[in-house]
Image (spheres, rainbow, N blue to C red):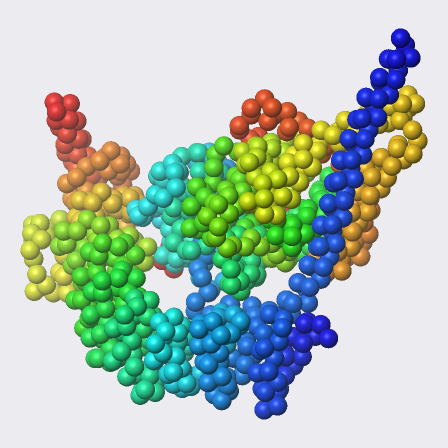
Amino acid sequence: MTFVTRCQAAGKLATIPTPEGTIALIAAIFDPHPDVQEVCLRYLGQLGDPAVLPILVDELIKVIEGNSLQSIRNVKTALVQFALEDVKGLMPALAHPQRRVRFLATDTIREIADRHAAKDPLRKNDFSPEIYHIFIDKLWQDEWGDVRARATGVIGHFHDQAGGEILAKLVKDKEWFVRLHACRALDDRAYLSIAPALMGCLTDPHWLVREAATKTLLKMGDLGAERIILSFIQGRDLYSAEQICEEMERSGMIFGLLESLEAPDSRMDELSITRTGSSSDAERFQATGVVRRMVTLGKVTMLLTFLRSPVRPEQKLGLIHELKARPTMETVDALHDCAENDPDPRVCQAAFQAFEESLKKLEAQENQQAVN
Amino acid sequence: MLENSRDFVIFITNVFTNIILLYFFAANGMYTLLMFMSFISTWFYQLRIGYAGLQEVRESPVTPPVTVIVPAYNEESSIIPTVESLLKLDYPAKEILVVDDGSSDLMLSRLIERFGLVKMDLIYRKRLPAKAPHGFYHNPAIPELTVISKPNGGKPDALNLGINFSRSPYFCTVDADCILEKESLLRLMYPVIQSSVNTVLSAGIVRIVNGCSIQEGHVTEIRLPKKAIERFQVVEYLRSFLFGRTGWHLLGGTFIASGAFCIFHKETAIEAGGFGEDTVTEDIDVVASMHRVLRLKKRKYRMSFTSDPVCWTLCPDKYKVLGKQRRRWQLGLIQTVMKHNDMIFNHKFGTIGMMSVPFQTFVEGFGCLVEFFGYFLIPVSFMLGLTPLNLFLLFILLAFVYGSLLSVGSVLLEEMTYRRYPAMKDLWNLLLFAILENFGYRQIVVFYRVQGFFQYLRGQKKWEVVRHETMRHTSPIPRQEAGS
């Protein structure tokens, strides 16, 4: 019988599961052909019989200890297909002294939890008490960074105070990839209380952590977005500001902000303004602040596109007022276009004045450079 | 004196005749070996795909993300269906980067208009040398798509920029005039995901789209093209991909991967220096550089070829354009093998050094000269009575009859396994053109290859621009609004 026939037979045994079939599949994971081993392990995972789990966990441990020739990936492929309620069967692997065993078991539970969470959000009660406690008490402080990193993904699904506190600590971990995974694990509105800890990651030395923190805050809803905007407007860190700017542009958030932009107002010139006024004032403040910061950073491409598009004249007036503060040749061109082509006379006039002022500033800068 | 001269001429003619026949024996012998390997490999692949876990890969939250990089220069007529097909790819985590290499046509405007893109300031981190981009275009409603515009710097430069901007551990290069089948990326990534050894390259098959119907980025009807030149190329592509590359994959000697559709492990490609500009076939060069780096560092790796994930591309429909394409391929191949000539018969590089590179150098690279002169020398010397009849017949057998058998074999392999051309009439046409290919078309291609060889000798570095006919659409394409 060729290995293909044996693989096909395994498929048939898995289609109509019977105890005898499961026993045959378990026996076939030791078949000499790797294809048969792979297929049988996959089908055993698909059947998800809790009685098989200890055998597979035992096999995983043997593979890592060098006592079995199975492929780690095949064994893991089978394990990740088990139901969340069965994962307590992985306890021996989670408490194993060999760190690779702990890592693979943690990663397996993370994959299972992620798969379930894609359908329904999870809570701590969806996990068995043993699993909950080993993550809360031990795995998050494992000696190996990879285990800690993978544990964050599971702890994030607990959605409770203890889990939140642990994640708040892990966003300050010494390993960048642990911080990265911790930032991603907080990707839920339920963790809004951890947002201040996450804000610290906006200035992380590793760009992937900065990016993850920004994305997570943006996914936390309006309050998360508000924190991001405040950080963008008031923060000093250039890299963090660039990252936030990119996420605001990519996510389309900037379109919504620019909607709130109005004609210039003396109150908006003071960035110390606080959210004491009406919500529309707050939105205006945010929009003005964001535009001002973008101009300071030189990230004006989207603003110039906006200036040339058919939007309310008040928005354009607000934009022109901010753009003239730091003119570039690109800005001057856009102001010139606007002055010549905009249908609103107020916008044309403001754009023309801004154009003249910007031109003078640019000339002065050039002269200064020539002198230097 | 006259008698001595005649003996000398006969001696020289015999030497050349033997070289030519030896070449045909070696080439055809290798092709036969590859044919058998391919039959076995494709046959087993067909059986195995039935129980492959594609569904698990599709549904798994940990399937590695892939960045699809599309370098494009003046592709206004074909870029929209290409991007349409990429957006519809069935893959859980993909990022699509179209790199506009300083096009002078309306390609960028068409992309902006069709996908509602907005110019943005995105962060660019340089890892490989490439000309700095001057614009990023994105639509938040289509988060997986980003278009980057840059000054013209050539295809390798555009690819390097795409690698720099990509966010995934793997990237897939796709030509701007290609249409990918919906499951192709998943199938191409499957050997990468399933392998326990680091799979640094996974290549797929390229087929010819001329004659087929395309609707909203999908090939909806597969038919043979009308023109003979296009049909010859259909047979040629089948032979090259189903025989050549599948066979080399089984021997562990993948050296050529079509940049039109290929997945690379990003860090390995970066370690190998990315796509170089010193050859005109950057896709072959980067594969050679990756072999070099990994072999010298004694790392375990695998390069895979799968004949199932399909990429459809336009082929030249005029001999003038075909000539430009084939000269470039030949020039690039010779540039690459000469650049990596220390690999030839070097045991440190394993199958690559002992089989692949020598075969590509002496059979595919320099062989065109032997073949070209053989077509003249042997018949002429036979007519002059300098070559005996048995040698002349052997030449005819090896050059024409055996070549036809190999082509017919590739068509039969296609029919026995994939059966992409459903019409019976198309199959008969394919078989007919598999035979006819060796009587005229092959000799023309050899002539172009010889021209490519002389371009190499002249030190030509730039490639001739190849313009294809536009793809045939059967439906209008609606515009997508930003923020919708």
Determine if residue B260 is in view: yes
Residue positioned 28% across, 50% down in the render: A311
Which of the 4 quarters of the picture holds residue B456?
top right
User: In the figure, A44 relative to B461: above or below?
Assistant: below
Q: x%, y% of residue A18?
A: 60, 90
Between B296 and B77, the one lying in front of the other is: B296
Is A89 located above or below residue B223 in the figure? below
Q: Which residue sits furthest top?
A: B1
Direction from residue B220 to residue B30 in the image, left or right: right
Please provide percent x and percent y for residue A345: 21, 41
Residue plotted at (78% across, 35% down) = B22
Left or right, A96 with respect to A7, comes to left
Q: Nearer the viewer, residue B338 or B329?
A: B338
For the residue pair A57 and A245, the one nearer the viewer reads as: A57
- Residue sitting at x 64%, y 39%: B358
Q: Quadrant of the N terminus of chain B?
A: top right
Where residue B206 appears, x then y in whole percent?
Answer: 62, 49
Q: Quadrant of residue B132?
A: top left
Q: Position of residue B287 (x, y in %)?
A: 53, 45
Q: Is A329 left, or right, of A91 in this rendering?
A: left
Residue B43 lies, with reference to residue B280, above or below; the image says below
In the rendered image, the quadrant that contains the C terminus of chain B is: bottom left
Left or right, B260 with reference to A362 = right
Residue B234 shows in the view: no
Residue B360, located in which quarter of the rendered image? top right
Number of callouts in the render? 0
